Image: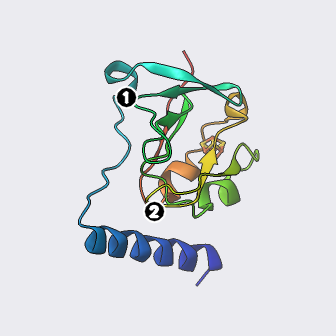
Amino acid sequence: MGLTFLVVVEETLNYLLFQSYSGEIFLPIDSDFKSKCKVAGEHSGHKVWGLVEPPVKLGIHGTNVAVDWDVCVGDGVCADVCPVSLYDMVDTPNHPLSNRKADPVREKDCIQCLACEMQCPAAAIKITSPP
Ligand code: SF4
């Protein structure tokens, strides 16, 4: 059994336990966010979508490689599996889910392999084709 698999299982259990204890339900990233949300600003060369009210609401970072920071549990599996090292992990102190998030800082390098989207334990990532 691979280490990555064990990390994913542990992070998924932590995520479910957090929801259980906190009484909050964190849904996966909304795949229709581009039609439902407005661009709130820019960060490290990519757009940020939706409501941004730090430290609790951090929005969706990226467009074609989109990470919902209000869903991301900061486990870093996406950064580990990405073949083009697209993600940086950044500190997000006092966010209710995790104190670090995956930031798609090299969004344009994506080769759309979907490894990050498939392995994210929180379903926080949505990969789409560039326009
Ligand atoms: S789809 Fe593949 S290349 Fe693109 S960010 Fe995810 S892991 Fe990296």
Question: Residue 68: image x %, image y %?
Answer: 46, 42
CA separation, marks 1 and 2?
Answer: 20 Å
What sort of colour scheme is used for the picture? rainbow
The amino acid at mark 2 is: Pro
Q: Residue at 55%, 80% (x, y): give it.
A: 6
Residue at label 1?
33
Q: Nearer the viewer, residue 88 or 43?
A: 43
Question: Which corner quadrant holds the N terminus?
Answer: bottom right
Q: Say left or right for 52 vs 46.
A: left
Q: Which circle marks residue 121 in the picture? A: 2
Question: Considering the image in quadrants, where does the C terminus appear?
Answer: top right
Q: Secondary structure at mark 2?
A: loop
Disc 1 crowd rating (10 Å Cα; few below 14, some 14-19, many 20+) is: some
Is the residue under label 2 in contact with that under label 1 (CB below 8 Å)? no
**Circle 1 — which element?**
helix
> Which residue: 35% across, 49% down?
28
Left or right: residue 96 compared with residue 21: right
